[in-house]
Image (cartoon, coloured by chain):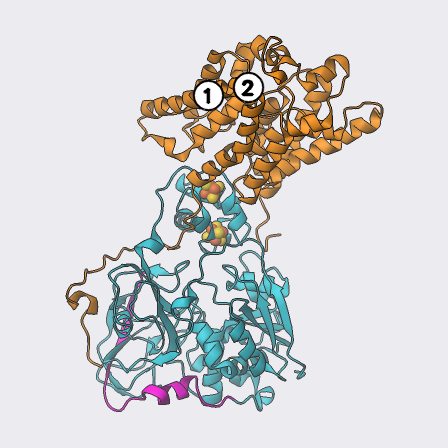
Chain colours: A orange, B cyan
Amino acid sequence: MTEKTFDTVSDPGMETPVIHVSPSPHLADQALTTQRIMLDVVIGLLPVVGMALYVFRLYAVKQLAICIVSCLAAEALFARMRGRALPLKDFSALVTGIILALSLPGPAPWYVGVIASFVAIGIGKAIFGGIGMNIFNPAMVGRAFVMIAFASALAASGYQDVNSSVDAVTQATPLDTFKQTGAVAPLSALFFGLTNGSLGETSALACLIGGIYLCIRRSASWEIPAGVITAAVVLGGITNLVDMDSGWTVLHHLFGGSLLFGAFFIATDPCSSPLTPRGKFIFGLGVGGFVMLLRLFSGYPAGVMFAVLLMNSLTPLINRWTIPRPLGAQ
Amino acid sequence: MAATQTQTLKNGTFPHGVHPPEHKEFSEDIPIEVVPTPSKVMLPLLQHVGAPSVPVVKAKDVVALGDMISKGGGFVSAPLHAPIAGKVLKTAVSTLPNARHVQVIPIKADGEQLEGQALFDDVLGGEWSYEGIDQRDPQEITDTIAACGIVGLGGAAFPTHVKYTRNDEKPVDTVLINGCECEPFLTPDYRVMLEAPRAVVAGALLVARAAGAETIIIGVENNKPRAVEVLKQAAAGTGVQIAVLKTKYPQGSEKQLITAVLKRETPLGGLPLDVGVAVSNVGTAAAIARAVLRGKPLTHRVVSVTGAGIREPKNLLAPIGISYQELVDFCGGLNASAARIVSGGPMMGFAFANLDAPITKGTSGVTVLTAKDVRKAEETACIRCGRCVDACPMGLVPTKIALASRAQDVDLTQRYHIMGCFECGCCTYICPASIPLVQLIRTGKAQVIASQRK
Ligand code: SF4
Ligand code: SF4
């Protein structure tokens, strides 16, 4: 066989290929990007958003619009201040905006949403160095700030507007009613979400549909909601056994308040939750456990927020405890 | 060894791993073709794990096919044999795809060559008889394997005789023959299983006899049902079992294969021998059969030249030492869309540009990828999603190791078992933030080694 020259180069009418050298692996899962994961979260939130719009009408429209616009504006502003390229394309600010809006009561005044958004993005995320660097769930940081700054607007009474034309808003929230009067909301109302509460927390069904979508797509780690639900069932079950007469059953605990919304959409924020499957489950157990403790022993309406923030702060520790055992290690 | 019925073990697997596109379609159905003898071959003295071999020929010597041209440079080493008849040229230096500069012995073709079907029949074809294998002297088998320069043909190129030499402290009870071929694109092992199944089984029986192993299992992924069929036929009555494994990357990695088939965990930093297992690739098994039963040294191997960037993908029987350029030319050259040339498969292979380099005993193929294959998003921040953790077949936390490597925190990388990483690439493959995890881990390993030298 004679020596040949580079066939391709001598071939008329054909471009010379440009060959790059780069370290292995030479393939990447091209369907899987941060942007796609965030987009999945937005899709998963749609049933909840839809339910919020249906139950709370204009309250929901207004709150969502305020928070989304403010979060996007804040993201753009802080990125510019840090001299970064506009990171809006990863959709994470959009996700923060929607979750924040859904975690607020409909009647909360407009400036609450705006301030919560700027705090969420600015303090919750930007000062840590942007997405991936933050320790706390940004939306919950914003929520906590306004909770303290505008205590009355966000206390149990802040959910209620007796003169409203929207039915749900005229009632007290079911958890609050139960605390005050011992009256138990019908399970079906909690499940379908026709009760008062934060915009996103009312319909267990919507949370389950969106949340299960996220878990199937693996854009949320199923271990986290599994942990939350396990803790709620166990602790709720125990209190049920202790107080057999209470009409507020385990299912009321699961479907009422923002437990499921928090389990599927808030606690699952990857940046502020642990890395390993075992760590994720422990994190979920912690969130669920704290939510139940707050529910049982305090009248605070925002248990999920505190539970998530608390567990966020424990995440580095959990990561350290749950370093997996490598294959073949002792 | 009792000649029991051929058993089939089903659907074993290992934890974690990824599912990259398989892309075997380019070359899987193309029968092995014999490359015409090239005008020149270059044989690197070091093309295996261990000590370089030592030349026993000098320039202008005339060599025939199969003559020894260098001898092993120690126990963990392997000799080289002339893959063509010709004249030895002056020793030179070449840069291999793994970026190592190595001394090479060039041989210029001269005189009558073994070509075409005759060559195929000599290497893989013809009759393979199992008769008398169980009577052979074990030591003689390993000696022949050593003398014939056989190393692992799956890519690692570890000298084969070392694994099968009897060792009373660490006896081998099971021989695993690896027919997984989990790297995307590559098909040389598949073709060997289809076209020379009896050579594979004969090789398996020989090494089991050498090592004194009772159990022999050939592991094949369930995306190769035809290979499973022909191997079952070839193994009938020999006691060799076939394990059909789930198709998942890196199923063909030694430790993962052992976990999948035998449910044994090779100790971290240890060898299969530590759990009584020796693993060889199917191509190696066929080369062993040829060495022991036909007295022929390792001079040729099957390589795939494949991928969307190559005009006519093929499986070739090629002399070791032929240049990549000649293989590519023989397959019609590159397409205009070619963007990356990889020695080996896309997950663990080396991208290179020096096509004048020779192929070695460990070269399983050339994969030519297009821009579409290698497209990669820009690196963004780690979102701590844990997908790399879920993908790592070694059970490591790649993101932590990689970020600690980037921060040059040697202690932290070791606390996360950086040296347990075998650079399979699953973590980088899956990372949604396109972080070059493996690359960072490689740097981290170099830092660890540097710190231990101090
Ligand atoms: S897969 Fe990538 S983004 Fe996810 S935790 Fe690992 S390194 Fe971070
Ligand atoms: S390259 Fe290393 S760290 Fe990454 S998945 Fe493979 S073994 Fe694990």
Q: Secondary structure at mark 2?
A: loop
Q: Secondary structure at mark 1?
A: helix
Q: Position of residue B271 (x, y in %)?
A: 54, 63
Please report, as a chain letter, where disc 1 is located: A
Does B105 lie within the magenta span?
Answer: yes
Q: Nearer the viewer, residue B360 or B60?
A: B360
Whether labels 1 and 2 belong to a single chain: the reply is yes
Residue hosting label 1: A67
Q: Nearer the viewer, residue B74 or A6?
A: A6
Residue stretch in magenta: B99-128
Left or right: where A206 falls relative to A294: left
Residue A323 seen = yes
Left or right: where B231 falls relative to A196: left
Q: Nearer the viewer, residue B200 or A109?
A: A109
- In the picture, the quarter occupied by the N terminus of chain B is bottom right
Residue hosting label 2: A104
Q: CA distance from mark 1 to mark 2?
A: 10 Å
Residue under the image location 27 percent in, 68 percent down:
B357
What's the amino acid at mark 2?
Leu
Q: Nearer the viewer, residue B223 or B101?
A: B223
- The reply to whether the residue tagged 2 has its Cβ within 8 angstroms of ligand 1 is no
In contact (CB < 8 Å): disc 1 and disc 2: yes
